[in-house]
Amino acid sequence: MHTKLSYSRDCLDSGKRIQVAPNENDVAAHLPLTPLSFQILLALVDEERHGYGIMKEIERRTRGRMSPATGPLYLAAQRLLDSGLIAESAKRPAPELDDRRRKYYKLTSYGRRVAAAEAERMAYLVGVAFDKDLVKGQLTIEGSETGTDTIPPKK
């Protein structure tokens, strides 16, 4: 089953709200993502989560370096919903574990493509920083599928 996504956007000239279908071929139009938007997409790559779960995953993955407040988190989530990068999920936990007031979110296939493009963009920039000797030593990526990956310094 294919669901057609649409979102509202304010018209600059008239101030009216119109429905616009996102162009799923125009991934680059979303780049660069804000750090919070990218973190929300990353939090949803491996599982559907509610807002508080997204917040806790961001805190865990960034080791507390990023701890979004609820207001900015939900505003960013709404923007991602409006642009078709995430969607509300109908999937719910068992009733005894659920709070009906919670909204659960999932990453759309379009959102996954945008997140991947943003990760590639950022990886390129990190490579440039290494090439320009802004970063010394080696890059270690913890938590990768193989445990820890190391990128040796350039010679």
Image: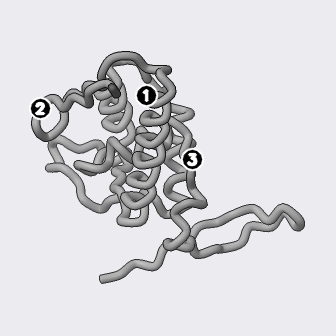
Q: Is residue 81 visible?
A: yes
Residue at 53% across, 50% down: 78
Residue under label 3: 32
Q: Residue 22: percent from the left, percent from the top?
A: 56, 71
Of circles 2 and 1, which is in front?
1
* Distance from Cα at disc 3 to Cα at disc 2: 28 Å
Instruction: Kindly report the distance in space between the C-alpha atoms of the residues bearing marks 2 and 1.
Output: 22 Å
Pick whichever of labels 3 and 2 is earlier in the sequence.
3
Compared with residue 114, is residue 53 higher up or lower down, i.e. above or below? Answer: above
Q: Residue at x 64, y 66 (%)?
A: 8
As helix, strand or loop, the secondary structure at mark 3 comes to loop
Is residue 88 visible in the rendered structure shown here?
Answer: no
Could you tell whether 48 is left or right of 79 in the image?
Answer: left
Which mark is drawn over residue 130?
1
Q: Residue at x 54, y 45 (%)?
A: 33
**Kind of residue indicated by mark 1:** Phe
Check the picture and name the quadrant holding the N terminus: bottom left
Horizontal and vertical percent position of residue 143: 19, 31
Q: Is residue 5 above or below residue 133?
A: below
Front position in the image: 43 or 138: 138
Question: Which residue is located at x 80 percent, y 65 percent?
Answer: 11
